[in-house]
Amino acid sequence: MADAGERALVALVRERVRPAPAWVAVGPGDDAAVVAPERNALEVLTTDALVEGVHFDRAFVPPDAIGHRALAVNLSDLAAMGAAPRSALLSLVLPPGLPLADFTAILDGFDALARAHGVALLGGNITRSPGPLVIDVTAIGSVRPRRVLTRGGARPGDEVWVSGDIGAAAAGLQSLAAGEPGSPDMAACRAAFLRPRPRVRLGALLGRNRAATSCIDLSDGLADGLHQIAASSGAGVEVDGRSVPILPAASAWFEARGKDPLLEAAAGGDDYELLFTVGPKGRGAFSAVRRQAGGVRLTRIGVVRAGSGVSLRRGGAAEPLPSGFEHFQ
Amino acid sequence: MADAGERALVALVRERVRPAPAWVAVGPGDDAAVVAPERNALEVLTTDALVEGVHFDRAFVPPDAIGHRALAVNLSDLAAMGAAPRSALLSLVLPPGLPLADFTAILDGFDALARAHGVALLGGNITRSPGPLVIDVTAIGSVRPRRVLTRGGARPGDEVWVSGDIGAAAAGLQSLAAGEPGSPDMAACRAAFLRPRPRVRLGALLGRNRAATSCIDLSDGLADGLHQIAASSGAGVEVDGRSVPILPAASAWFEARGKDPLLEAAAGGDDYELLFTVGPKGRGAFSAVRRQAGGVRLTRIGVVRAGSGVSLRRGGAAEPLPSGFEHFQ
């Protein structure tokens, strides 16, 4: 479905996606795309939509960041399964009066991240809408059989690890939404929200090396991720609050507003980090992953216990960690 | 990304999709789905979004028809490539105040069509929105190598064929939008718009038997489909206007409004019929397809010529057929 204006936009998209890799038999421009699946691999598929006014505000999220984020959140989901990304489909629902320059900037943001990870854009769909901008991406990756990571494999005694920093995106979003002039200190937090770097290489390494017993991405925040792994694995998780890696600028942002940095960071979403568990048999493989992970910070933050739920220990007694989280509206 | 309310809705979706087929290694509920690709087959992928106020109006399109249509338009794209559908991903962007009964009815409409064609729902995404309802589906199918149908294979001398009836959906939409009480005569037209039946079996048969040299679905109307095949194939098409199959009720609807039924039917979109060309070598295979196609009406409407563009002959001299079409807004 397309009208003449939409077709001109589709042509703009197509210009960007050439040349297609050899395994793409039919690329954008026909009723559907045709690809040769990767041999001896399982296919991993995910879809996630970003909606203006729910997941981002065009007042402070530049269009290239919208395109970047839309692909990043999906690549992060593939990484959490241990899969390497391969291709994507892009569905754009465009509000009235969106400037053409914004449209091409959205594509540029998408395209730059796709190229960085060797993701082929197979096709998509552009439609007008009376309502907010919606950018919906389906991402497809591949993983070898028996190398898939799920949320459900954590066992008592496993170590709990997380990549990168927690809470930076939440602090960055609050700073952007407050309309404050960007300070150098907050630049990393704002970047974490605007242009998250999905842990594509780390996820594929964890899967390929069978280094993790479970994995999830932190799109809905650390607290939620811990609860999801605990519930899916039929186990409990105890987190050492002092070890959770929080960027100093994010801590300072929350403290200056009278908030508990750890709880804010744990509840804040949009951290596209990986949370995973490492079992006794996987420790050697995990050491190899750490060497190959290219400088991504990896921090041990807790342990899997028999039982259920998530508890947080900060020096004294453990307290339950709520799974609550909220989105910018 | 989901909040508590969205998670309850996701749980409703999951209840409907069990049990998954054996080739689904990880179904809905993790960061992504994992499937085993079909052996010795190419994979065919398409995505199409329906937007309230652009592609449908909730005032006269019941929610189950919204769910049905969203999957149908994608299955139609797969059929046009000669592919058999296998799986789908569903992305729902929900407006404020959508009744839960409407939500479940959308799922029911989607699910009934999915079951009818053996399509496994692999996963998806539900998000709130301040704006209109958007339902975005990615459909995935499979086709044997060298059995793919594209728009670009028509050659001079090939016959041009179309399935079903043309223009019924356009007349049905006009009748619905006018708020007229449904007449028995118009019921088929309204049904053609509300619950189109994608030509899943016909498309797969045409591909498998190598019976067609090119194929497209008529989501944007017959005139557009003819122009797309002509342009992609580097050839011209001459249509015999008297042979184009138009439902009598649709003809009567257009005539009563002083419009040319053939031009209205050709310009009207939302016909999820297949338009395809049959070459001299494919005629035997096509006869076999006709026997197996289960009573789907197939009509020869023209011939491929050297040259370019689409001409329409109605008794006398041929005239150019415009590719114009429009959508309900």
Image (cartoon, coloured by chain):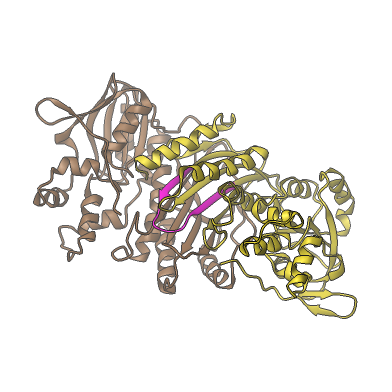
Chain colours: A brown, B yellow
Q: Quadrant of residue B252?
A: bottom right
| Visible residue check, residue B111 | yes
State which region is magenta. Answer: B124-139
Residue B2 in percent (x, y) is at: 37, 44
Q: Which quarter of the rendering shows the N terminus of chain B?
A: top left
Residue A263 in percent (x, y) is at: 18, 40
- Compared to B113, does B161 lie above or below? below
| Residue found at the very far front of the displayed protein | B181
Which residue occupies 27% across, 36% down?
A323
- Compared to A261, does A315 lie above or below? above
| Visible residue check, residue A45 | no
Q: Quadrant of residue B261?
A: bottom right
Residue B276 in percent (x, y) is at: 77, 59
Overall secondary structure of the magenta stretch?
A: strand
User: With A273 as the anchor, is B210 left or right in this view?
Assistant: right
User: With A45 as the anchor, is B324 left or right in this view?
Assistant: right
